Amino acid sequence: MPTPLTADIRPDRSYLDVRAYEAAGGYQGLRKALGASPQDVQQTVIKSGLRGRGGAGFPTGQKWSFVPMDDTAGHRYVVVNADEKEPGTMKDRLLLEGNTHQLIEGTIIAAWAVKADIAYIFLRREYTAAARNIEKAIAEAYQRGYLGKGILGSSWGLEMRLHLSAGRYMCGEETGLLNALEGRRAIPRNKPPFPQVSGLWGRPTVVNNVETLSNVPHILREGPDWYKTLSASPDAGTKIYGVSGKVKKPGLWELPMGTTLREIIYEHAGGMADGLSLRGLIPGGASTDFLTADQLDVKMDFDSVAKAGSRLGTGTVVVLDHRTCPIGMLLSLEKFFARESCGWCTPCREGLPWVARILQALEDGTGEQRDIEILEQHGRLLGPGRTFCALAPGAVEPLQSALRLFREDFDAHVRQKRCPFK
Amino acid sequence: MLSEKERQLIEAETRHHEQKRGAVSEALMILQESRGWVSSEAISDVAEALGMTVEEVDGIATFYDLVFRSPVGKHVIMVCDSVSCFVMGEQRISDHLRTRLGVEMGGTTADGMFTLIPVGCLGACDRGPALLVDGEIHEDITPERADEIIARCRKESDAHTAHG
């Protein structure tokens, strides 16, 4: 079973330098891309079926195709979204640390596909090992002629810079990220105009996730048909899945897209830790709906997880065992969202702290029956269409599903005036 | 007022942006690095250097987790309290650190050595609970490991004082 993204990553994630990367076939995808037109590269990625791995699952090639190719009156940008901060998600860190050149190559190919001349890697400052590796990889890529003027003898040039962000979840939201790069508060922008038309400094800009771009060199090198064969579902390629929580072997694995939750949790993560049983899980980071233990045959691809009532999100699972309080877990999630809300939209700014306070009250034994109704109302008040970005709608996905699936736990907290798990 | 070195570092950053203001978060971190935290004077210095208003710069400084707008201890311990670490027992680590250091979350020890702050997901979910200590991520934290980290920080500071 091929694992193109992770095959060359060493167990200690030590830096894979440019020679080691080239010896494993690195930068051949870029050579192929430069032998084709930008539009052809876009078509290749469209044909491959690659969908964005940041959580939303938008088709990558299609995203690129919205860039107006005739608007060359100024800079054009590609931005790598390496601001991974979705709770429960640690997959991009693996790729950033363990195979840095793969991301650099994917970014250069994406830049060629939209004729960009400047690329930024927007990295959270907390990922210090990743930052060191990216600095090395960019320097090596310049030395080898993969960056700078006249790349590999062509007339096209690209400059690449690492930007270290000072820490905020909102910077991972595409338009918030662009505001942050412009030296503004990372509040979301209205869409349209979409960043592809008017992004960084008002210029055409493509923002892609780390895992998404890490797929691109392989698609160019081996072709879109090969890429589709990697998958166990209609969504192409492999996916880096993760499991955290009380399982025997928490970790990350690159598997065919569409691998079942059962295989991920019981084969790769070794099943639940001794004495614990699985009660539920969030399949793809903090902003996805809870699923339950009777949904383990769900395939982890975008459409299958959506049909099961949740989202693939980042594909990193957090498990809820029968000894952990679901309301406590939900409180941790909502405290995060309340803290990270940028404050731009009233429902999110005011609603999320309210939700967190109620959940805290339930945990403290001071919650009332009426509080549960207020939580239910917030599921609607913070849902899609009421705020500029997806932070609040994402925050209420675990809330609404927890109210549906763990209702007896909410009631027990009110009835017993304490957390029954403590 | 900016020192010559601070001015040079900030200017070097502005060259990588379309407009000077693009370097505002870097400028704030440069001053924090040299001065320990970002005071109101530092905010004015950055505003002047980048042609922004004081309010704009403060709005950005207060937005970021890693920009300290009040004085912090020599060592900053940030505890990940996001979902995976919560499930793995973050509460136990937070309680231990609070007791051991004798401060609440957000507080600084009386000797000015440690500041304790909660932080959102550090991307160490498969190896939680996790801490960010002086900018470096530490994983698989137990109360014992937390004590070791505290001891190491103290030792570093002692060595620094001895040499300084």
Image (spheres, coloured by chain):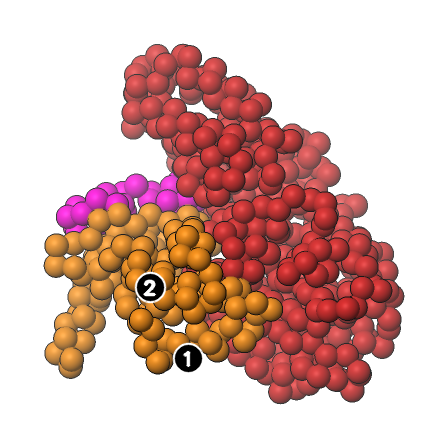
Chain colours: A red, B orange
Residue in view at x 76 percent, y 50 percent: A59
Question: Image quadrant of residue A388?
Answer: top right
Q: Secondary structure at mark 1?
A: helix
Task: Give the mark nearer the N terminus: 1 vs 2.
Answer: 1
The magenta segment? B80-105
- Residue B120 screen position, x and y as percent: 41, 48
Q: Nearer the viewer, residue A1 or A49?
A: A49
- Mark 1 is on which residue type? Gln
The chain under label 2 reads: B
Q: Is A17 above or below relative to A307?
A: below
Residue nearest the viewer, comparing A73 with A50: A73
Task: Check contact, mark 1 vs mark 2: CB within 8 A.
Answer: no
Q: In this picture, is A248 found above or below A20? A: above
Residue denoted by label 2: B42
Towards the viewer: A29 or A349:
A349
Q: Is residue A322 visible?
A: no
Note whether A150 is above or below A167 in the view shown: below
Quarter in which the C terminus of chain A is drawn: top left
The local crowd at label 1, few if under 14, some if 14 to 19, many if 20 or more residues have their Cα within 10 Å, is: few
Q: Is residue A318 left or right of residue B102?
A: right
Mark 1 — on which chain does it sit? Answer: B
- Residue drawn 73% across the image and 39% down it: A303
The residue beneath circle 1 is: B8
Q: Secondary structure at mark 2?
A: helix
Quarter of the image containing the N terminus of chain A?
Answer: bottom right
Is residue B40 visible in the rendered image? The answer is yes
- Crowd rating for badge 2 (residues with CA inside 10 Å; few <14, some 14–19, many 20+): many
Label 2 amino acid? Ala
